[in-house]
Amino acid sequence: MSVEYYAKLERGFLAGVSAGVLDAVARTLRLDDAERAHLLRLAHEADGSSAVARPGRHPKQWTIRPGLQWSLDAITAPAGVGNDRLDLLAVNHLGRALFSDLYTDPHRPPNFARYTFLDSAARQFYPDWELAADTTVANLRTASGKDPYDKGLHDLVGELSTRSDDFRRRWGAHNVRTHGSGVKHFHHRIVGDLTLAYESLDLRAEPGLTMTIFSPEPDSPTAQALTLLASWAATSNTSDISNEVSA
């Protein structure tokens, strides 16, 4: 591969590039799985090969199916459903309590990116705010490669770029990430520090949506804190969230 050809690829001219060339670039740059998948998606979009396979758009207003809400409610740990734009679309009771501070606008669903960069409370909620911010932007960058035509995502990125220097700087780094499983740390204003393992599961009946379950280690301080959180949620006056939100 010539220097001129590689420079052309760096400038984003990916139309017609073979899979073999992309694999070679990925190996040479030591891209991880998320970065390699992002590169391949960008190349497919450039030559139009993914236009037929692109998932159908969700209707503007998404209403949770009763069965899905019942499934959430049957989970004893905090759980919720979200989209690639990091909107929190549905939760169970303990999930609502865990993320209660995100519910500030009754006219649109909570959004983890807006909360992270535009709400000062996020710096208390996330003990390692820098890591949370990096991860949030990398997830949005990955989403932009999956669906470059998502107007809602474009609007969100534009809003955050205009209002947050921290976001704008990270967005320019072009980092990507696959959000599947791991451990998250929170500092909840009611029960304090929480260490929760999470698993994200794609919903086959709802393309583009993911259910995430947050689980504590059994008999740990976090498990005890969640018991207290459940008691607080049961006696608090937190209002029910609407089941009809933008997906």
Image (cartoon, helix red, strand yellow):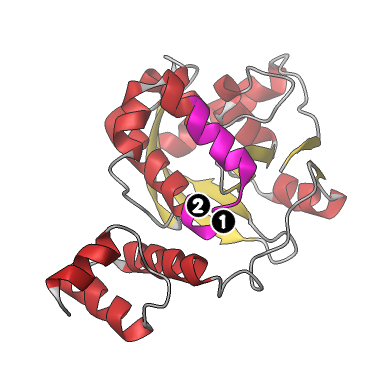
Q: Nearer the viewer, residue 39 or 142?
A: 39
Badge 1 local density, few (<14 within 10 Å), some, or many (20+)?
Answer: some
Report the magenta residues as a range. Answer: 143-159
**Is 135 above or below relative to 178?**
above
Q: Is residue 152 magenta?
A: yes
**Dividing the picture into quarters, in which one does residue 186 lie?**
top left
Q: Please name the amino acid that badge 1 sits on.
A: Asp
SS type, badge 2? helix
Q: Nearer the viewer, residue 42 or 122?
A: 42
Q: Which residue is mark 1?
A: 147
Which residue sits at x=38%, y=68%?
A: 14
In the image, taking residue 175 as reference, residue 141 lies left or right, namely: right
The image quadrant where one finds the N terminus is bottom left
Q: Is residue 119 magenta?
A: no
Q: CA distance from mark 2 to mark 1?
A: 6 Å
Q: Magenta segment, principal secondary structure?
A: helix
Q: Which residue is mark 2?
A: 143
**Dividing the picture into quarters, in which one does residue 30 lie?**
bottom left
Residue 124 position in % (x across, y down): 37, 19
Residue 127 position in % (x across, y down): 32, 27
**Dividing the picture into quarters, in which one does residue 17 lie?**
bottom left
Q: Are marks 2 and 1 in contact (CB under 8 Å)?
A: yes
**Is 204 above or below relative to 141?**
below
Residue 9 position in % (x across, y down): 28, 66
Q: Nearer the viewer, residue 48 or 160?
A: 48
2 vs 1, front mark: 1
